[in-house]
């Protein structure tokens, strides 16, 4: 090396956050929807239109505008537990005009938000519960932790109460515990002339009520499309009802159709779960997470006394 020369400096790492992440944190839209907004040329940084998804920016220094409106400061991360009733779609809007979880939060984009609900940030669901399923659903504006929780590698435990038609054999339940082959995508998807099949991860399954249509408590560490329904159908049984009662360390403790904000400790437990660390649940199940006692059949009225 020449005596007066200096070693070459490594290129400085990119500064700031990705623009789509900044938009999502500011409550403009989800991360994916924010990418589309950028591609459509609707975003300006310091007066220059940006259409490249890898662009980084610093919201504390740069002037970022979306559709000409100056971006407000990033929102604080907030988390909510929602008890989704049966008959609601896990989305913010539905082209078929079905009720959505956003309606339960008073945040449907088809309605003007007023009152206490107007003080909530725009919230997005973590994972999904299908139209006919019910129970614990997380809603947040924290895209990073939501994505971390949704990754299969995190192995976050999710527990459900499942009612099936007909009584599966012990062999069938043991097969479900070990893993079964199911369709990866939607039932009508066929790739390369054949269905795309995948084996499910081992599951914890315990029968909690017997009878002709028994109930099972099932714990999964993954969340594939309609997984529980596909698993039981694979061993010959139709699923009648599904209720999610736990997610990580959280247990369902609110009534159907209501929601509450998580405590800092509960959010910390979600962070631990997303990192693959062990989290403990309370042993006693809250009432909304319990299987309700069956209603006894009505007794027939006694025959009239003979005259």
Image (cartoon, rainbow, N blue to C red):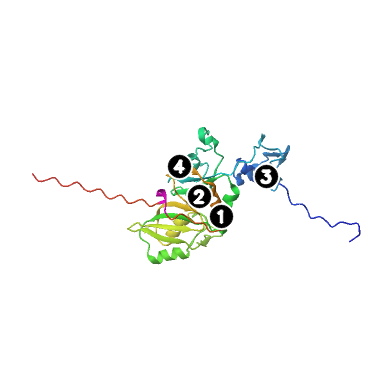
Mark 3 and mark 2 in contact? Answer it, CB < 8 Å.
Answer: no
Within-10-Å neighbours for mark 2: few <14, some 14–19, many 20+: some
> Which circle, 3 or 1, is nearer the viewer?
1
Mark closer to the chain start, 2 or 4: 2
**17 inside magenta stretch:** no
Q: Quadrant of the C terminus?
A: top left
Within-10-Å neighbours for mark 3: few <14, some 14–19, many 20+: many
Residue marked by disc 2:
128
Q: CA distance from mark 4 to mark 1?
A: 26 Å
Q: Residue at x 51, y 36 (%)?
A: 117
Q: Is residue 194 placed above or below 73 in the rendered structure? A: below
Mark closer to the chain start, 3 or 2: 3
Mark 1 and mark 2 in contact? Answer it, CB < 8 Å.
Answer: no
Q: Residue at x 58, y 51 (%)?
A: 147
Q: CA distance from mark 3 to mark 2?
A: 26 Å
**Which region is colored magenta?**
284-289
Query: Relative to residue 154, is residue 251 drawn left or right?
Result: left
Q: Residue at x 48, y 39 (%)?
A: 103
Mark closer to the chain start, 3 or 1: 3
In terms of depth relative to the viewer, which is nearer, 37 or 69? Answer: 69
Mark 2 and mark 4 in contact? Answer it, CB < 8 Å.
Answer: no
Determine the secondary structure under disc 1: helix
Q: Position of residue 251 (x, y in %)?
A: 46, 51
Mark closer to the chain start, 1 or 2: 2
Residue marked by disc 4:
258
Residue marked by disc 1:
272
Q: Position of residue 36 (x, y in %)?
A: 63, 44
Residue 19 is labelled as 3
Query: Relative to residue 101, is residue 23 drawn left or right?
Result: right
Q: CA distance from mark 3 to mark 4?
A: 34 Å
Q: Residue at x 56, y 53 (%)?
A: 149
């Amino acid at each position: 090396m020449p005596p007066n020369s200096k070693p070459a400096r490594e290129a400085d790492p990119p500064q700031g956050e990705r623009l789509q992440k900044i938009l999502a944190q500011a409550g403009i839209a989800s991360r994916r929807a924010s990418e589309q907004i950028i591609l459509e040329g609707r975003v300006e940084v310091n007066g220059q239109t940006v259409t490249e998804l890898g662009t980084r920016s610093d919201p504390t220094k740069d002037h970022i505008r979306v559709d000409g409106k100056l971006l407000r400061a990033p929102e604080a991360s907030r988390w909510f537990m929602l008890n989704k009733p049966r008959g609601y779609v896990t989305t913010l809007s539905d082209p078929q005009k079905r009720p959505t979880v956003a309606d339960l939060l008073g945040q449907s984009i088809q309605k003007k938000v007023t009152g206490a609900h107007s003080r909530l940030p725009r919230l997005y669901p973590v994972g999904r519960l299908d139209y006919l399923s019910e129970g614990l659903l997380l809603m947040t504006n924290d895209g990073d932790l939501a994505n971390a929780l949704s990754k299969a590698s995190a192995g976050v435990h999710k527990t459900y109460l499942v009612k099936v038609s007909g009584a599966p054999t012990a062999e069938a339940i043991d097969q479900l515990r070990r893993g079964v082959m199911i369709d990866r995508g939607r039932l009508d998807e066929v790739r390369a002339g054949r269905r795309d099949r995948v084996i499910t991860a081992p599951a914890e399954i315990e029968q909690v009520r017997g009878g002709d249509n028994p109930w099972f408590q099932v714990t999964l560490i993954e969340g594939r499309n309609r997984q529980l329904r596909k698993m039981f159908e694979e061993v010959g049984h139709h699923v009648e009802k599904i209720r999610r009662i736990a997610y990580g360390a959280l247990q369902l403790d609110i009534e159907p159709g209501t929601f509450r904000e998580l405590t800092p400790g509960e959010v910390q437990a979600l962070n631990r779960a997303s990192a693959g660390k062990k989290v403990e649940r309370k042993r006693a199940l809250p009432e909304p997470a319990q299987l309700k006692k069956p209603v006894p059949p009505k007794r027939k009225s006694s025959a009239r006394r003979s005259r």
